[in-house]
Amino acid sequence: MLDFARGSAQKQSCVTQLAKSFYADWRTRHGRMAVFQDAADPPPERLLQAIWQHQRLRRDQLRTLDGQSVRVLHPGFASVEGGPDFRGAVLQFGEAAPVTGDVEVDLRTSGWRAHGHDQNPAFCNVVLHVVWDADRAASGAATLPLRAALDSTLAELSSQLEHASLRLLPENLRGQCAAPLRDLPATALTELLRAAAHVRLQNKAAAFRARAQHVGWEQSLWEGLFRALGYKHNFWPMQSLAELRPRWLPGADSLLTLQARLLGLSGLLPAELSRRPAGADDYLRRVWDCWWRERAEFADATLPRKLWRFHGLRPANHPQRRLALAAHWAQAGNLTARIERWAGAVIPDKKLLDSLTNILQVAGDDYWSWHWTFRSARMQKPQPLLGEKRVTDLAVNVILPWLWTRAAAGKNEKLRLEIEKRNAAWPAGEDNAVLRLARQRLLGRSTLRTGAERTAGEQQGLLQIVRDFCDHANTACAGCGFPELVRNLFHENKVGGLE
Ligand code: SF4
């Protein structure tokens, strides 16, 4: 087991330190940091919406004003067309069957009438009124006060979430920062992106630390891994399944039992055995036999199938196959220890991806190496249960932030700096629409000066700048402070001598 509490600080690159502090200082000076104290006034409604969207809550302790427990299976999607703040949330009240409906977020219960929601037919489908604090309900929907349910202090949440965008901005205009960025030396641009990436790493790490305080380090890691396996489509049902780990893990004495429990709990087991492709019926029958014996025990926690989204999903990313992979990890029983050993090992940058892939990849699965889903035909060649792009996603979004915050909590400076080094050097992950748009707006071209982003760290830095700045300005960049940051970086010679 790796000792997270020992080690001495390594000398860090003064250039990296300079850029990091410059970025962080700028955020502080320009109000990009928390301004509240917990005991002060209520937070802005925008922050309350972000807290709900990101579920920065003690999710196992949510209770409505009338004392019913609330299980959030999906928080809903931020509305872009007016009406309730979140559409299509899936909630379970007490032991009743899950319901789908809208969620409205107001600071006070009186907002329901003050904003005219009681007269507006668009709010008929609201099933939960989320408020900051309340002593009585004002709507016909259940009322959930958040004040006592946050997973961190309001100051911390403000710092981490105040710039989290609830919706994407329209694209297609080159940004006002494009000109000053063009003047920046290539090395300075790289350092700027790495400094922004460091802020992103810290924010992700803070969420792991907050969650670990309530459920422990190992459980917080498993929840992160499941969320990442769910991608953007199925993030929330995977989170719900991970939260049930203390129930589905004990007593599972075989891989088949674990796969049956996860597939059964997910609600994704096909009900019929007939008309399946060759080989599918046999495996499905064995999974069903296993699940049939236990399903009454898990009936209260089984997810509704409609919680899952399949539209636009690549076959390789189907949640059935991802759950089968997670069952392999759980059955091995040593994933956390192997990740900890990997963190402490000496690994050249060029071997980082391969070395972590060796830990996360499984040797093979009699059924899932040959099929994308229960419905798909047997493939001609076996396919790995995890590709390299997904390993990168797991590394930058889950494993590195989790290791970093553990090292920070244990005051192991040497390990913390090693994780930062790996985060900066990790090879670039999959390109996406946000990165493509950011490159066009910020850099005036479709690739970085040196080609495509060479590292995942540079991609993460670009994403953090989008979150901190682009998501809060209009298409004309009105009021954006990023051009000023870049000009200061250049003119104040903060990066002088980099070239
Ligand atoms: S909003 Fe700011 S950071 Fe984004 S493109 Fe415009 S000037 Fe650049």
Image: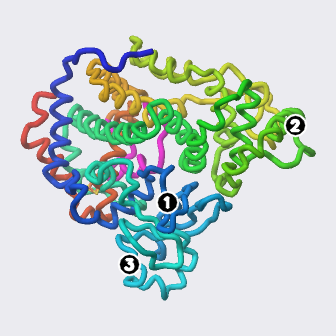
Report the Cα–Cα distance between label 2 and label 3. 53 Å
Q: Which mark is residue 285?
A: 2
Q: What residue type is labelled 3?
A: Gly
For residue 99, above or below residue 23? below
**Which residue is identified by label 3?**
111
Horizontal side of 189 relative to 82 (left or right) equals left
Which quarter of the figure has residue 398? top left
Q: Is residue 371 left or right of residue 285?
A: left
* Classed neighbour count for the residue bearing mark 1: other residues with Cα under 10 Å, few (<14), some (14–19), many (≥20): many
Distance between the alpha carbons at the discs numbered 2 and 1: 39 Å
CB at mark 1 closer than 8 A to ligand 1?
no
Q: Does the residue labelled 2 lie within 8 Å of ligand 1?
A: no
Which structural element holds mark 2? helix
Residue at image point 66% right, 24% down: 331
- Tag 1: amino acid: Arg
Where does label 1 land, which residue?
A: 63
Decide: marks 2, 3 in contact (CB < 8 A)? no
Q: Furthest-right residue in view?
A: 274
Magenta region: 428-449
Residue 133 as seen in the image, left or right of residue 90:
left
Circle 3 packing at 10 Å, graded few (<14), some (14-19), many (20+), is some
Quarter in which the N terminus is drawn: top left
Residue at coordinates 87% horizontally, 37% vertically from top-left?
Answer: 285
Query: Which of pointers 2 and 3 lies earlier in the amino acid sequence?
Result: 3
Q: Is mark 1 on a helix, strand or loop?
A: loop
Give the mark nearer the N terminus: 2 vs 1.
1
Q: Residue 149: x and y, percent?
A: 40, 55
